[in-house]
Amino acid sequence: MPLFDTHAHFDAEQFDEDRDAVLSALPESGVCLVVNPGCDVPTSRAAVALAEKYPHVYAAVGIHPEECGAVTEADLEELRTLAQQEKVVAIGEIGLDYYWEGNPEREVQRAIFRRQMELAREMKLPVIIHDREAHGDTMAVILEYPDVRGVLHCFSGSPEMAAELLKRGWYLGFDGPITYKNARRAPEVAAITPLDRIVIETDSPYLTPVPYRGKRNDSRYLPYVVEKLAEWKGVTTEEMTRITWENGLRLYGLTELEKV
Ligand code: NI
């Protein structure tokens, strides 16, 4: 049963030593599809290059809220060009991050987030949203673009926010932290999320699940996320693997390309 890692950063420097070995080995370890999002223009370019090189890798292009401080019109123009490449399946990751003190001004973050929501609408692509400690403002921007859909990556909001998003056709992404002992909201959110709206992610090289927490993450640890979700939803791991594979295809519009 193939696994779909809907969010992993294999362009990250943590993979500089062994990127090709790790990526080449994924299909034989069961991870048959990966979406690699960008976080700025250079990493978006890198994501597209990885997608061109590996048949099982697709790309998303976007500017992460932590990287949006010095974005120029030329950067946004290049993003538009990248978004038209054949294996680009989403705009991301984009959004708001109010957690770190040193992050760009909130006003700037919101402006760049909106520009990329507009790009997604224009390109008819789904979005991958990063929301950290910015739930209210993230939701407000989402509501401004009712025709744009996508996934709330590593969802950390309340069950109420989840319900609002689910009503509007969004997907919720679950990662390694759901395996941590202190996962409190995630089980509540999973409980109200229909099976057909759950996608699995690693956010490699970050967010490594138990029992490898603290080490570099890669897509091969995805089964730990699947096991936890299967337990919470009362289905078998095989069933959860199949459902999240189909959800990933539907989220990124790959249904026509990849016959299940
Ligand atoms: Ni990420």
Image (cartoon, rainbow, N blue to C red):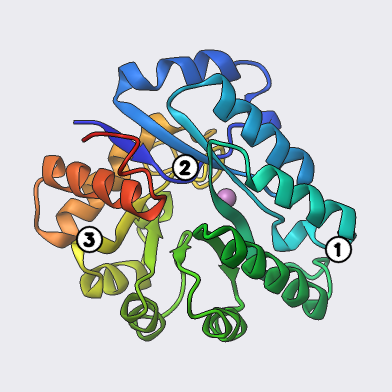
Instruction: Please state, as top left, top right, bottom left or bottom right, where the N terminus lies in the image.
Output: top left
Q: How far apart are marks 2 and 3 (CA)?
A: 24 Å
**Residue carrying label 2:** 208
Tell me the kind of residue under disc 2: Thr
Which callout, 1 or 3, points at the residue further toward the start of the chain? Answer: 1
At 79% from the left edge and 56% from the top edge, which residue is drawn? 76
Q: Distance between the residues labelled 1 and 3?
A: 36 Å
Q: Position of residue 194 (x, y in %)?
A: 21, 68
Q: How far apart are marks 1 and 2 (CA)?
A: 28 Å
**Residue carrying label 1:** 69
Residue 229 located left or right of residue 185: left
Tell me the kind of residue under disc 3: Asp
Rendering quarter of residue 73: bottom right
**Residue carrying label 3:** 196
Q: Mark 1, mark 3: which one is toward the viewer? A: 3
Tell me the kind of residue under disc 1: Gly
